[in-house]
Amino acid sequence: MVEMTDELLAQVIEDACVEEYTEMMSDTRTHEFTKDFYAEMDLLINNAKKKTKIKHRKKITFLLVAAIIILNILTVVANEPLRIKFGKLIGTFYHNYIEFTQELFDEESMENSTFVVRKLVYTPMGYSLISENENIDTMSYNAIYTDKDNNILDYGQASIYNSVTNVTIDKEEAQKIKINGMDAYYYQDQEIRSISMEQEGYLYTLSGTCSKAELIKILESLDLQ
Amino acid sequence: MITFLLSIESPEDKSKFERLYLLYRNKMYYVAYDILKNSQLAENIVHDAFVVLIDHLDKIEEVESAKTWGYLNAIVKSRAYNYYKREKKMSYYGDVSEELFIDRDEPLDILINQDIIKELKNIIKGLPSPYKEVLYLQYYNELTGEEIAVIMGKTPENVRQIVKRAKQKIKLQLKERGYYGGNDR
């Protein structure tokens, strides 16, 4: 005999629900809906599509803005005095920012090293790769994945020597977390969750609408050590 | 990159909403029809259910899943019964807050074995509306009382009482079948 816990009740309820679903799906009855019903539903479906498109455009806009900012910063950091000023500017204007310093690695060895792309090993079920860009000159790599509901997963690897060293956060403060024992930073802007981490002179950033746990799982699949 | 980003949404991609509509409209219709016994009213209820659903699409993870059907089923049934109650002026489960409740503990507070689990599943499947739907939404869909209240057109307090009453019904039926041996507090 065992105690009837809420967890056990939840399990029994899940079994009952799945059984009912199977029974329901085997019901093949079809109803001939009226023209009025179809007309009203067409309107609803169009409204739903518009809402989805607006939501989707917001996500794209966010990612585009992020990409443009990174591209602009790549230009700025090519000039060392500008790079220093720009870094200070970000630090001055934004209350919350994360700094990935360049002192952690040897620039000379970085310049002479071969750029090894660390691609994602694991992606959540349903996501497929739709865009992949590798730039040997800037030692950067970017991959975008999406699923059937247009959720986006944006992954980037960039040399700190060539790229931005500050990540700004508008609202909530970043949380320091661990990915395979390495320091990483989790932050969220509306529905877009991101994790950034620095390892061996590279900045790895993963953004998407999936959960924090899922983002961590994806980054943990990278072999960075 | 811009080209790639803009190509994400292809015209062939059916929206989640449309896929739900195509897969479940007939099932939803017959749920409503079984309650109202009127084709036109059942169609209206299905339409109303989709109107509610459009603002809660984020609660749907997979289109083809028991969780999703539980969610849609609850919306349709609650609307059909609300209509029935309103038109027929009959007492319906929506008035549970008016019933006399014995303030019992929330947990079922019983000892069970595998035989009881099988019996318990049958009891749960046989619970009348809205007890079964609310239990499904709370325990399987993991919705909060507030979320359940919104989609079922009830108050959170009403939902809480429905859950409590559902557990009392389960306990009573287990007792009637000779399985319940816990404290009948």
Image (cartoon, helix red, strand yellow):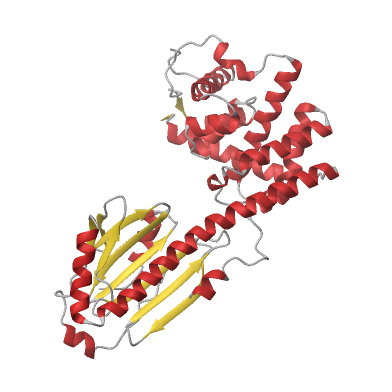
Residue B163: image x %, image y %? Answer: 51, 24
Left or right of residue B132, residue A115 in this image:
left
Q: Residue A128: x, y in percent?
A: 52, 69
> In the image, is residue A127 above or below residue B100?
below
Residue A117 in percent (x, y) is at 35, 80
B9 vs B124: above or below: below
* Residue A124 visible at all: no
Q: Which picture quadrant has residue A207?
A: bottom left
In the foreground, A133 or B1: B1
Q: Is residue A60 left or right of residue B18?
A: left
Name the quarter where the C terminus of chain B is drawn: top left
Residue at x-position 68% and y-position 24%: B82
Q: Nearer the viewer, residue B178 or A116?
A: A116
When asked about the image quadrant of residue A158, the answer is bottom left
Q: Where in the figure is residue A85, as x and y percent of width and height? A: 19, 72
Q: In this view, does B112 lie to the left or right of B12?
A: left
What is the quadrant of residue A111 in the picture?
Answer: bottom left
Q: Which residue is drawn at 45% across and 57% down?
A: A209
Q: Which residue lies furthest to the bottom in this view?
A: A112
| A221 relative to B139, above or below | below
Between A166 and A203, the one lying in front of the other is: A166
Residue at figure coordinates x 58%, y 52% from the top left: B62
Foreground: A107 or B95? A107
Residue displayed at 22% across by 90% down: A112
Residue A149 in sight: yes
